[in-house]
Amino acid sequence: QSALTQPASVSGSPGQSITISCTGTSSDVGSYNLVSWYQQHPGKAPKLMIYEGSKRPSGVSNRFSGSKSGNTASLTISGLQAEDEADYYCCSYAGSSTFWVFGGGTKLTVL
Amino acid sequence: EVQLVESGGGLVKPGGSLRLSCAASGFTFSSYSMNWVRQAPGKGLEWVSSISSSSSYIYYADSVKGRFTISRDNAKNSLYLQMNSLRAEDTAVYYCASVGSAPALDYWGQGTLVTVSS
């Protein structure tokens, strides 16, 4: 059982937008503005896409955006492209005892 | 260019030991905290351990506490994970990841596979 809850799968057609939710608790997502999102293609290492809830690292497309409300964070991908098909993981800082907690991952399929 | 290269993975019997290494380049290794994150076959990501830039602060997931030891050598730009009393459930790809200017796991290595099986 993962600490953060994500849908197992989402799908969308090219050009559409999708949103992936990430639900935690008041001990992690709700307490810290330290939610990050990672993209992972099969057989590859995860790649940081969003940090501090809504900030994009240099080089990440502005089609990726993040937000947070209460204990739930969200990742939105607009203008879906074939190369966006991957697994996406949310992650939150959860204090010095638990440190980083991950969601179970969401498989994005571009139809 | 930031590079993190893990090594040391392999097949080990239950109860055995293994030492993973992560060689860093392209950034000021001594300034950043480092982490180990693992991924069991077909499963999600699991944080394993974290060490601060000067090794003053060290943290472990409950699942590995007392069995794994994280360390670093800033002179050698290297991160280590000593894994003892290995169990089948420790089978995973182990990634090293840095926490840099962004408070997140911003750079990852390619991973090294650890298989615990008799």
Image: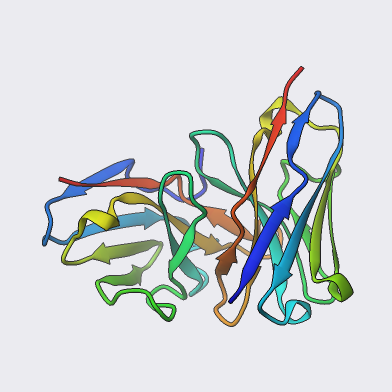
- Asked if residue B55 shows in the view, the reply is no
Chosen colour scheme? rainbow
- Along the line of sight, which residue is nearer the eye, A110 or B33? A110
Q: Is residue A21 above or below residue B116?
A: below
Q: Is residue A9 above or below residue A35?
A: above
Figure quadrant of residue B117: top right
Q: What residue lies at 30% left-to-right and 74% top-to-bottom?
A: A61
Left or right position of B105 against B71: left
Residue placed furthest toward the front: B1
Q: What residue lies at 48% left-to-right and 34% top-to-bottom?
A: B42
Q: What residue lies at 57% left-to-right and 76% top-to-bottom?
A: B103
- Along the line of sight, which residue is nearer the eye, A7 or B91? B91
Q: Position of residue A24 (x, y in %)?
A: 45, 55
Q: Quadrant of the C terminus of chain B?
A: top right
Residue placed furthest toward the top: B118
Q: Position of residue A17 (x, y in %)?
A: 16, 61
Q: How many marks?
A: 0
Left or right position of A42 against A27: left
Q: Quadrant of the N terminus of chain B?
A: bottom right
Left or right position of B97 against A20: right
- Asked if residue B45 shows in the view, the reply is yes
Q: Position of residue A12 (x, y in %)?
A: 15, 51
